[in-house]
């Protein structure tokens, strides 16, 4: 779980971080003194926080304006206002924020907001964690894994979506570059993505999660931890975490959304 803590007052930010860490020790918590800095991190570093705890009265971009901006750049992120002023509650609910916590902070209220926003799925610490519900994200030891090329992440997402089935270069090209027909050029692109994927995984000792032979690729389901796979295996916490969004940034994933929605029906 990735959580943003935002407050322009250093002492308040420190206390907010400390309280979140006490109730969610497995979470990655990133601190920002301004809402603008948090938005820049989302855009420039491709971060997708599960929850954003934010003060309301801040310079440059106040909490209410931040909530509007977050719906544009990270629509699946839940925002919880943390403030000493109750008069903003009506405006907060108009913006459909996830929660509203009054200062002074209480651990119980922060825990309640985290549990309400994100049903707990605790990643296995010794495996790469693949988050498919909402945006597709990749975590290693609770930190986002960064790739050298943007589409490397999409290549990995497609392999995950195929659930361990062997994927050919032609199948990969059809999904990642729909409509393009120059297979010679596309195979060069795929080779570049594979090299980046191999390099990134090798750096964390996880190269073995990918099977590769004769230009074909597959993922080892047994070597990764994944909310999608947990749901397929009957994990109720994972099933409850699915709220209709799956690898939302990739249009080719829409077929799986329909299948998962049907599977969740009683």
Image: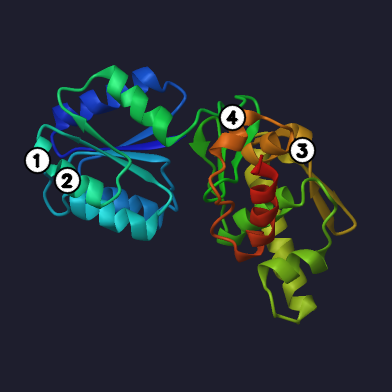
Q: State the residue in front, 26 or 235.
A: 235
What residue is at 59 percent from the left and 61 percent from the top?
Answer: 250
Q: Is residue 101 above or below residue 212?
A: above
Residue furthest out toward the front: 266
Q: Secondary structure at mark 3?
A: helix
The residue that mark 1 highlights is 87
Mark 4 residue crowding within 10 angstroms, few (<14) / some (14–19) / many (20+)? some
Sequence-wise, the earlier of marks 4 and 1 is 1
Marks 4 and 2: in contact by CB < 8 Å? no
Residue 6 is situated, as x and y percent measured from the top left of the image, at 24, 39
Q: Is residue 190 above or below residue 47?
A: below
Image position of 146 (left or right of 223): left
- Discs 4/3, front: 4
Marks 2 and 1: in contact by CB < 8 Å? yes
What residue is at 19 percent from the left and 51 percent from the top?
Answer: 64
Mark 3 residue crowding within 10 angstroms, few (<14) / some (14–19) / many (20+)? some
Sequence-wise, the earlier of marks 4 and 3 is 3
Image position of 8 (left or right of 209): left
Mark 2 residue crowding within 10 angstroms, few (<14) / some (14–19) / many (20+)? few
One can see residue 216 in this view: yes
Could you say which disc has been placed on residue 221 in the image? 3
- Discs 2/4, front: 2
């Amino acid at each position: 779980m990735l959580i943003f803590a935002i407050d322009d007052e250093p002492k308040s930010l420190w206390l907010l971080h400390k309280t979140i860490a006490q109730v969610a020790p497995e979470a990655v918590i990133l601190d920002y003194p301004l809402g603008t800095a948090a938005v820049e991190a989302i855009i420039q570093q491709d971060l997708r926080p599960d929850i954003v705890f934010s003060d309301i009265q801040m310079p440059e971009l106040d909490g209410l304006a931040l909530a509007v901006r977050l719906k544009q750049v990270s629509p699946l992120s839940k925002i919880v206002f943390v403030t000493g002023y109750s008069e903003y509650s009506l405006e907060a609910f108009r913006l459909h924020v996830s929660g509203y916590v009054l200062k002074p902070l209480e651990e119980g209220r922060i825990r309640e907001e985290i549990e309400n926003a994100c049903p707990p799925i605790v990643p296995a610490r010794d495996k790469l964690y693949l988050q498919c519900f909402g945006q597709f994200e990749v975590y290693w030891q609770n930190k986002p894994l960064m790739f050298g090329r943007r589409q490397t992440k999409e290549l990995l997402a497609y392999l995950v979506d195929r659930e361990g089935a062997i994927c050919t270069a032609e199948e990969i090209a059809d999904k990642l570059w729909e409509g393009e027909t120059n297979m010679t050029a596309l195979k060069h692109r795929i080779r570049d993505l594979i090299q980046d994927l191999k390099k990134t995984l090798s750096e964390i000792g996880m190269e073995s999660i990918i099977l590769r032979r004769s230009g074909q690729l597959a993922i080892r389901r047994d070597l990764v931890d994944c909310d999608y796979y947990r749901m397929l295996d009957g994990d109720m916490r994972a099933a409850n975490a699915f709220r209709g969004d799956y690898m939302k940034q990739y249009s080719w994933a829409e077929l799986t959304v329909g299948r998962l929605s049907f599977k969740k029906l009683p």
